[in-house]
Image: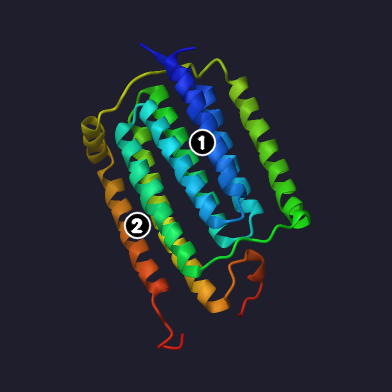
Amino acid sequence: MSIYAIIFYLLGAVIVAATALAITRRNLMHAIVYLVLSFIGTALLFFLLGAPFLAVLEVVIYAGAIMVLFLFIVMMLEIKPEERTLGPWLRQWAPALALSGICLMIMVGFLFLNAGGPGPLLLVTASPLAFGRFLFQKYWLGVEIASFLLFVALVGALYLGRDNSTTGG
Amino acid sequence: MATIVPYSHMLILAAILFLLGAGCAVARRNLIMILIGVEVMLSASGLAFIGAAMHWQQLDGQAFVIFIMAVAASEVAVGLALIVYSQRRTGSLNADDYDLMKG
């Protein structure tokens, strides 16, 4: 087992543990901080998998912008932690766990049925220069559409978030 | 050329993360936790795309992660604005409380 494989499995364990902790916290603030850890681990995994530019973007967008947005909303709405009740908790999680487990087993089964095809991943790195050239040569239309989508989302968030106490709506 | 891990392990990690996010979106009742579950799912799909890009040595997979990030950012902006809006209207963040067409 090479050093890269060890790093991969360590990072995978950290990401899965942090995500599992995040989705089970009753206090939203704790959940978001665990999620930041999970996204930083994902960014390191991106770096290991040859995408340094996307690793930086993952930290800036996911662990930075999106999680700070969640934190702002949690602080703005003054959300109390949910009370600890075991019965409803089990009723909520048991079906989700069962269905997710079945889906995971089917996915893993498919992967091992096709074990001949996917070989080992080779260690290569896409430099940000090459990646940017590729993106703007082949997917320039997609980039424009993505920017338009972000603009529409900005307008929508402004429209929904405006203070409508004066208009009575 | 150094190898990292089999491609299937990469996909299994992405599948586990995706299902953790899906389980969070299904099982939690807080609207913000549902949105967080969707974020985890989007991030896991990005991981699968990066693994595929590395496996086939093509940059297309990495290009799609940019679009996934744009979709995630706009989704979270509109979603949180909707949550704030509905919290102002109804005073609740519990998904079970939203059971009226005219509130």
Residue A149's disc number:
2
Viewer-nearest residue: B18 or A35:
A35
Q: Element at badge 1? A: helix
Q: Amino acid at mark 2?
A: Leu
- Residue B17 seen in the current view: no
Q: Amino acid at mark 1?
A: Ile
| Picture residue at 27% right of the left edge, 51% below the top | A144
Q: Residue at x 45, y 58 (%)?
A: A70
Q: In the image, residue A137 lies at what x, y percent?
A: 22, 38
In the foreground, B22 or B67: B22
Tag 1 subunit: A
Instruction: State which chain disc 2 sits on.
Output: A
The image's mark for residue A79 is none
Residue at the spot of label 1: A15
Q: Is residue B94 left or right of residue A67?
A: right
Q: Which residue sits at x=50%, y=67%? A: B83
The image quadrant of residue B74 is: bottom left
Q: What is the x, y in percent for residue A87? A: 78, 55
Residue A138 seen in render? yes
Between the C-alphas of marks 2 and 1, the distance is: 29 Å
Instruction: Judge whether A161 appears above or below A148 on screen.
Output: below
Q: Could you tell me if the residues under marks 2 and 1 are in contact, i.e. CB atoms within 8 Å?
A: no
> Which residue occupies 44% across, 41% down?
A39
Q: Position of residue A140 (x, y in %)?
A: 25, 44
Image vertical order of residue A98 relative to residue A11, above or below = below
